[in-house]
Image: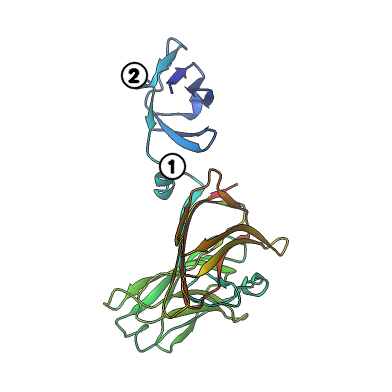
Amino acid sequence: MAITITNGNEKLTITEGAESHSYNRDNLSVGTFGDYVLLFRDFKEHRRFLYTDVTTPTSTSAVDLRDEINALLIQEPYMHEVAAGEMTGKTVWNKFGYNSDVDTGAEEIIASFGGAFNPVSNVITTAQTFTITYNNGTDGLGTTGALSLLFTYIDSSFTSQIGIHTLGSTGSDVTSFTGLGINRAVVFSNGGLGYNVNDITITATDDGTTQAQVPALGSVTQQALFHTQINHNFFAEWLLINCRKLSGAGGSPRVTIRGYSWSRFTLTRYEIFRYEIDTSVENTLEIAPPAPFTVGGREVLYFTAETNTNNTVVNLRFTGVEESV
């Protein structure tokens, strides 16, 4: 597809096929990056250009981009640019989690702490502190394990925040900050081992519900759950699921994976994804939909697993961009 640039007295126009994108010259200077999106039948492609010349041209005729007269197309992948912080108002999130023991009877959340997840009671409605429970013989003050944690959480205004908590020596601490949900907690410092020795479980202090867990030896939360902040959308563009039998008899499990969006506004759960995996046929599924799963502001995205065989292991990872609106 031919790419041309028309550098007029007032605008810089980039034309690629039927797509045309114009930029005011007054808003461009040497070194300025511009962004545009090409829409194709089956996918979209994000492009960037670097403006390299702001002199007033003598002609408004189209020039071939290969001549590099007025702009340089940047072919860096879109996700790389967002992850590098080069796209204002956009953040890449890689979420990953597992449930190492899904049993029959009811669907369980795909998170290291497992069990049933009822958003009516598990999603916090009133901001509160978090209680951190840990083994003070292996983690906490004076140990070689985890010494402090860094949290990424949603505050009372539904805005993403960063908080650091230094573990004490009693085995149970309460954070100084309050929040409505935790997107990630990581071991921020340790006493020499390089990881947390035992599980570190984080609950809502008032509600008593499990909000996150840093599993033993992992140093980071493992949960297929994401809280979208206010005035943002989350676009999940890639999903990977793996299922297998952990131990014991029972053959190859049939596992139903469900994705839900819980709206804090309507207080309603919406099923947005379902897939059944027969592990006698396949045990790994990778999805990169042509249009992303879209989750709006103040919504909670989470995944569950239901199985017909005890001791089923489910691993899930998804990637997306949270973007301000």
Please determine whether, in this image, residue 53 is positioned above or below residue 156.
above
Q: Which element is circle 1 on?
A: helix
Examine the image and state in which quarter residue 249 appears.
bottom left
Q: Nearer the viewer, residue 199 or 231?
A: 199
> x%, y% of residue 20?
53, 24
Q: Residue at x 49, y 16 (%)?
A: 9
Is 190 on the left or on the right of 112, as rendered?
left
Q: Residue at x 37, y 26 (%)?
A: 52
Please determine whether, in this image, residue 78 is positioned above or below residue 96.
above
> x%, y% of residue 37?
51, 34
Is residue 65 visible in the rendered structure shown here? yes
Q: Amino acid at mark 2?
A: Asp
> x%, y% of residue 140?
37, 83
Q: Nearer the viewer, residue 310 or 205?
A: 310
Examine the image and state in which quarter residue 274 appears.
bottom right
Badge count:
2
Q: Amino acid at mark 1?
A: Tyr
Q: Which residue is mark 2?
A: 67
Q: Residue at x 66, y 75 (%)?
A: 121
Q: Residues within 10 Å of mark 1 (few under 14, many from 20)?
A: some
Residue sitting farthest toward the right: 266
Tell me which numbered mark, 1 or 2, is placed earlier along the sequence: 2
Q: Residues within 10 Å of mark 2 (few under 14, many from 20)?
A: few
The N terminus appears in which quarter of the rendering?
top left
Q: Which residue is mark 1?
A: 78
**Label 1 to label 2, Cα distance in Å?**
24 Å
Please determine whether, in this image, residue 22 is positioned above or below residue 106.
above
> x%, y% of residue 325?
60, 46
